[in-house]
């Protein structure tokens, strides 16, 4: 009778789990933002002499328009309207309480002259440019220390024209790290929505040291062989919502970061409370969702659901190494569909690029409480490559209700990993074979104890003659 009760209990627990993902974090649900909220002051970029012919450089027009609108920042804010046309520009700054609105057929084009992208100081949590020592080129659309910034429109386009930067990178002729397409620093109340982003020189959307960021309904595209063209990279940022996005680029679709080695450890600003929902995309050589490899300030409370990746190298990857320090904990990934993905789950603990020789090789990352639930996959080469660090095992890795159609004979490869699994096919590696049920719910993130007791109570009520 005990085995009968166990089966019933297990099934009831799974029913409970199917309803709890976002109830548990209801206070962090992405809120719909009224991007159509009327700013009391509005101007059109043509009022400042801009010409939308794709040839005339309009950097001064953007700068002058935003300088003028700054006088309304304390009067309810302002809106800069970009009408249909092809508006070539270099880097320009945003201001607080601003809406940058692109009309349906508006295209902001990044200049292909590197002089139009000024060089700025490296991020303090990186200590240097990510690619080269020293400074870095400023993003095309840039802002720092801002509040209430909206970049949106009627599905207009921002095109970084990054091919020239990719060629300079490949030829090793750059003096500074390539620019992002959009970067907001030390800002709060950021909304980016209803736009298409093309051909970023480097990472596409990069909120760094930010709070309360929403990225909704965006399309991000770059050639599959374009170098390091990440889609959305929350970096040392908190309360970030990413939803209803389609991304196809040359690198990670989403990569959560928090600083690099000793600089990230010292700066000590984590990325936390990040929600990713209804994300679709693919790439050739990287992952759908990545954490790291720059994670030295810590990453925690990441929730991803309703994910669809296809024709990609990796579904989910955690990248770290000796010398990173920091932590990755409390990660919950659920309701994932993978099709034609080489590796479903990859923990890479040998991602050993370092900013300089001053990193501490004894700074070991703490990796714990990562849950994958409700994952299905078709035409998957490898279910999991889960590699912890010798002497620094990754703990409480939990796999629940995962079914993968794997085409290789060795679906799992694990080392220096500890965790649990239930209802996983193909069968997991030895370090994860111990069942989540009935003893280890509390070890698995977002599989809380009260559900176990509730399920047991329901099972007893439903089957009163069964004893545990």
Image: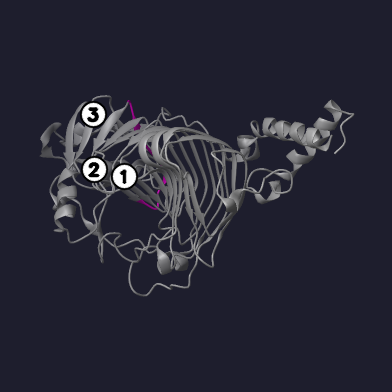
Disc 1 target residue: 285
Disc 3 target residue: 106
Taking the spot 42% from the left edge, 30% from the top edge, the residue there is: 35
- Of residues 298 and 338, which is closer to you in this image? 338
Quick one: label 1, few (<14), some, or many (20+) residues within 10 Å?
some
Of the numbered discs 1 and 2, the one sitting upstream in the chain is: 2
User: Split into 4 quadrants, where in the image is the N terminus?
Assistant: top right
The span shown in magenta is 144-154
Q: Secondary structure at mark 3?
A: strand
Image x and y of residue 452, in percent: 75, 40
- Of residues 336 and 258, which is closer to you in this image? 336
Q: How many marks?
A: 3
Query: Is there CB contact under 8 Å for labels 1 and 2?
Result: yes
Q: CA distance from mark 1 to mark 2?
A: 8 Å
Answer above or below: position of 399 versus 20: below
Query: Is there CB contact under 8 Å for labels 3 and 2?
Result: no
């Amino acid at each position: 009778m005990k085995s009968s009760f166990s089966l019933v209990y297990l099934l009831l627990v799974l029913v409970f789990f199917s309803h709890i993902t976002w109830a548990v974090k209801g206070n962090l649900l992405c809120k719909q933002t009224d991007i159509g909220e009327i700013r009391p002051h509005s101007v059109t970029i043509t009022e400042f002499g801009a010409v939308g012919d794709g040839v005339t450089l309009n950097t001064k027009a953007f700068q002058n328009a935003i300088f003028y609108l700054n006088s309304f920042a304390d009067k309810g804010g302002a809106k800069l309207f970009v009408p249909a046309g092809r508006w070539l520009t270099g880097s320009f700054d945003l201001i607080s309480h601003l809406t940058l609105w692109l009309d349906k057929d508006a295209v902001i084009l990044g200049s292909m002259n590197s002089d139009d992208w000024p060089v700025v100081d490296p991020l303090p949590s990186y200590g240097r440019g990510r690619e080269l020592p020293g400074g870095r080129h400023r993003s095309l659309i840039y802002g720092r220390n801002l509040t209430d910034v909206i970049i949106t429109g009627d599905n207009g386009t921002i095109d970084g024209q990054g091919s020239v930067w990719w060629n300079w990178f490949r030829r090793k002729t750059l003096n500074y790290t390539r620019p992002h397409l959009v970067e907001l620093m030390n800002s709060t109340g950021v909304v980016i929505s209803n736009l298409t982003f093309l051909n970023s020189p480097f990472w596409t959307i990069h909120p760094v040291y930010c709070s309360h960021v929403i990225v909704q309904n965006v399309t991000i595209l770059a050639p599959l062989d374009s170098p390091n063209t990440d889609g959305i990279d929350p970096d040392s940022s908190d309360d970030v919502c990413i939803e209803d996005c389609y991304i196809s680029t040359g690198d990670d679709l989403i990569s959560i970061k928090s600083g690099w080695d000793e600089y990230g450890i010292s700066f000590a600003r984590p990325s936390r409370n990040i929600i990713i929902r209804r994300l679709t995309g693919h790439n050739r050589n990287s992952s759908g969702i990545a954490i790291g490899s720059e994670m030295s300030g810590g990453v925690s409370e990441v929730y991803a659901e309703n994910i669809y990746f296809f024709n990609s190298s990796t579904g989910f990857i955690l990248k770290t190494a000796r010398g990173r320090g920091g932590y990755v904990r409390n990660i919950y990934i659920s309701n994932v569909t993978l099709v034609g993905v080489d590796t479903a789950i990859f923990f890479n603990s040998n991602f050993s690029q370092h900013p300089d020789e001053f990193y501490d090789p004894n700074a070991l990352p703490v990796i714990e409480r990562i849950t994958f639930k409700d994952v299905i996959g078709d035409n998957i080469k490898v279910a999991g490559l889960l590699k912890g660090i010798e002497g620094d095992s990754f703990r409480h890795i939990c796999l629940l209700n995962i079914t993968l159609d794997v085409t290789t004979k060795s679906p799992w490869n694990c080392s220096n990993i500890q965790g649990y699994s239930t209802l996983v096919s193909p069968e997991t590696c030895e370090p994860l074979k111990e069942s989540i049920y009935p003893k280890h719910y509390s070890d698995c993130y977002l599989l809380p104890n009260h559900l176990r007791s509730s399920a047991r109570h329901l099972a007893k009520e439903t089957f009163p003659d069964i004893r545990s």
